[in-house]
Image (spheres, rainbow, N blue to C red):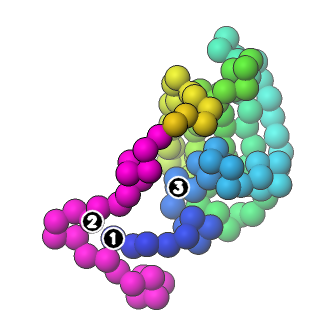
Amino acid sequence: MEKMKLKESEDMRAPLAFLLGKLDFSKEFRDFQMSADPAGTVLAAVPKSDRLPYDRVEMLVQPDFTIRRLVVTGQDKSILSFQFDKERVDPAVNDAMFKFRMPPGATMVPQEASQ
């Protein structure tokens, strides 16, 4: 297991950071395209930096501005798709849900050693 800050991650899940309010979509992406879809509007864009491991992000946005789908195309043309349902804004959650417990037999790799 490696522990690192999200901004230092090149993991394909990093595009989800803007869903969590960690990225400014209009600042990080360019070449925006919009198209109609029966379920809402499809918004597609490419990252401003070509140093990222993905080269396109597409999302389906409903009329109430909820995001139902996020599709990330990697530079290697791999596709990672996320589906969202029953979004709730600021729900009450127990902090214990977010406590990481290392699985038995796993070891932590120091961040310096993983670079």
Residue 82, position as x, y percentages in the image: 51, 36
- At label 1, counting other C-alpha atoms closer than 10 Å, the crowd grade (few under 14, some 14-19, many 20 or more) is few
Q: Nearer the viewer, mark 2 or mark 3?
A: 2
- Name the quadrant containing residue 113: bottom left
Query: Which callout, 2 or 3, points at the residue further toward the start of the chain?
Result: 3
Residue ID for mark 2: 102
Residue located at (74% from left, 33% from top): 43
Find out whether the residues at labels 1 and 3 contact each other: C-beta distance under 8 Å: no
Q: Amino acid at mark 2?
A: Met
Residue 110, position as x, y percentages in the image: 39, 84
Position of residue 84 relative to residue 93, above or below, is above
Tell me if residue 72 is in the magenta stretch.
no
Residue ID for mark 1: 1
For the view shown, which residue lies furthest in the bottom direction? Answer: 112
Residue ID for mark 3: 12
Position of residue 57 relative to residue 102, above or below, is above
Query: Which callout, 1 or 2, points at the residue further toward the start of the chain?
Result: 1
